[in-house]
Image (cartoon, helix red, strand yellow):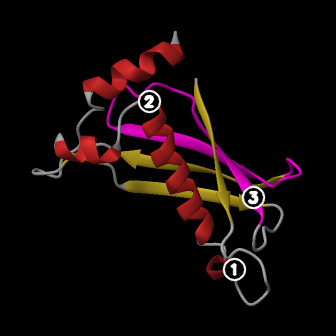
Amino acid sequence: MFTTAFQIRVRYAETDQMNVVYHANYATYFEVARTESIRKLGFTYREMEAMGIEMPVTEITMTYLRPARYDDLLTVETVLRELPDNHVISFHQEIFNEKKKLITSGKVTLFFLDRVTKKRTVMPEILREKLKAYFN
């Protein structure tokens, strides 16, 4: 299992009229944390795109338990529970506040696509090699 944690401070522009983080911003928090989790492996989305691979989101689910507010420091935990063996990759993500209370949880599923043909493909071998150590 591959697990990372990334911290994000809530900016004023991310809050709504009720003074809480607008619900759609949690998807952005998830994306930032996923990108940073791949970066911690020594690989980037930019490198993947240069290799001709795109990763569109095909499904996202979120459960909101508690509000986050302006200037809160959030920790987004990202977990890859399975090493993908086909075109699908799913990240399980949870967001905690500074009191370590779970505020949002979710799952994001993406596909590996060939940038030219737009057909499904598999994870790049270089990324698979970097992740293998976490699944032995």
Secondary structure found at label 3? strand
Between disc 1 and disc 3, whose residue precedes?
A: 1
**Residue 100 included in the magenta stretch of the image:** yes
Secondary structure found at label 1? loop
Q: Give the residues in magenta.
A: 72-101
- Which quadrant of the figure has residue 61? bottom right
Q: Quadrant of the N terminus?
A: top right
Between disc 2 and disc 1, whose residue precedes?
A: 1
Residue at horizontal 16%, vertical 51%? 115
Residue 73, label in figure: 3
> Which residue type does callout 2 highlight?
Leu
Residue 29, label in figure: none
User: Mark 3 Cα within 10 Å, few/some/many (few <14, many 20+)?
Assistant: some
User: Mark 1 Cα within 10 Å, few/some/many (few <14, many 20+)?
Assistant: some
**Do the numbered discs 2 and 1 sit on residues whose CB atoms are within 8 Å?**
no
Residue 41, label in figure: 2
- Mark 1 lies on residue: 15
